[in-house]
Amino acid sequence: MGNFQSVNHPTTSQIVSRTMDGTLTTSPTSTSSHLQFLGIAPFAGPNLLGALIQSFETGIIFGQAMRFWSRSQRESVTVKTCVAYVVVVSFLRPSFSFLEVWNGLVLNFGDFVGASSPRWGSKFQPIMNVLLVAPLEGLLIWRCWLLTGKPTVLLVIFVAAYLASIAFPIVQVHEVFSAEFELVFIGITSNLAKNIKPPSYQLEPILVCLHVIPEVPDVALSTIPVDFFPIMQERCP
């Protein structure tokens, strides 16, 4: 982890505290014992890499969209609307990610609390992911249901998993907006200044469900067509 060696910067040479009226204040304290822990790389690295990867994905989606529009004369209005919708959302995702990188690496450079605390753009990422994949998942569910002979049980399972994959990210965003990340990091810096090891946090089961359940329909929708490929090849000479 990198070390901060700035002495005059108010966010690294002073400990931040919150008063009763909710405002943030600073009080001078000794920083020699905790500045070595305030490495911003574990927070800046994932944000920067995530923004770059999302930009790469957006470029691929935009290229595919341009190919689609070049031969979309016979496509329905619904399909064209879905493609335009996906392109718009795919541009919004990296925009929010780069906004988070800008806040962390430029506006709050050298400020551990400000740089490591997620902003609204980063907090909205789960919903942005859902908005991007929801139309495609709905289409794949309908196609897989037709491919398997329209079984009612499979349709109910797919619809339940589909709704859960939409509901859980909404709950996740609500929980993230309710959390006081600044207070958490302020407490960490205060404990480090006193040579107190920060407490360890155990991952709650609901958070595991938030990440696992949305992946269930993705795995199922990818597996079912693969299983039917050999059958289709046998029927087609």
Image (tube, grey):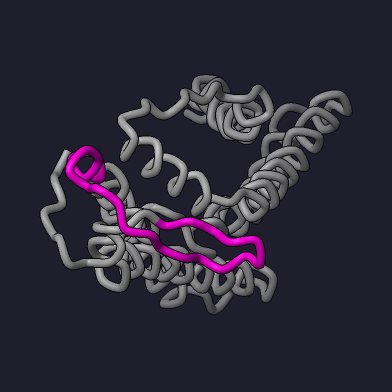
Q: Is residue 224 visible?
A: no
Up the image or down, 173 lies above or below 237; here it is below
Measured as percent of width and height from the top left, residue 81 is found at 63, 74
Magenta residues span 16-38
Instruction: Say which quadrant the N terminus sits in.
Output: top left
Quarter where residue 21 is shown: bottom right
Up the image or down, 44 lies above or below 147; here it is below
Residue depicted at x 23% and y 61%: 110
Residue depicted at x 67% and y 52%: 178
Task: Count every numbered label the image shows and give the total.
Answer: 0
Tell which of 107 and 183 is nearer to you.
183
Tell which of 197 and 93 is nearer to you.
197
Q: Is residue 164 visible?
A: yes
Relative to 198, is 152 on the left or the right?
right
User: Furthest-left residue in view?
Assistant: 5
Q: Look at the image and say whether residue 18 sits in the magenta stretch.
A: yes
Relative to 160, is 72 on the left or the right?
left
Residue depicted at x 54% and y 59%: 18
Measured as percent of width and height from the top left, residue 94 is found at 39, 65
Measured as percent of width and height from the top left, residue 169 is found at 65, 46
Tell which of 155 and 10 is nearer to you.
10
Residue depicted at x 60% and y 73%: 80
Tell which of 3 and 167 is nearer to you.
3
Q: Look at the image and say whether residue 222 sits in the magenta stretch.
A: no
Up the image or down, 18 lies above or below 36; here it is below
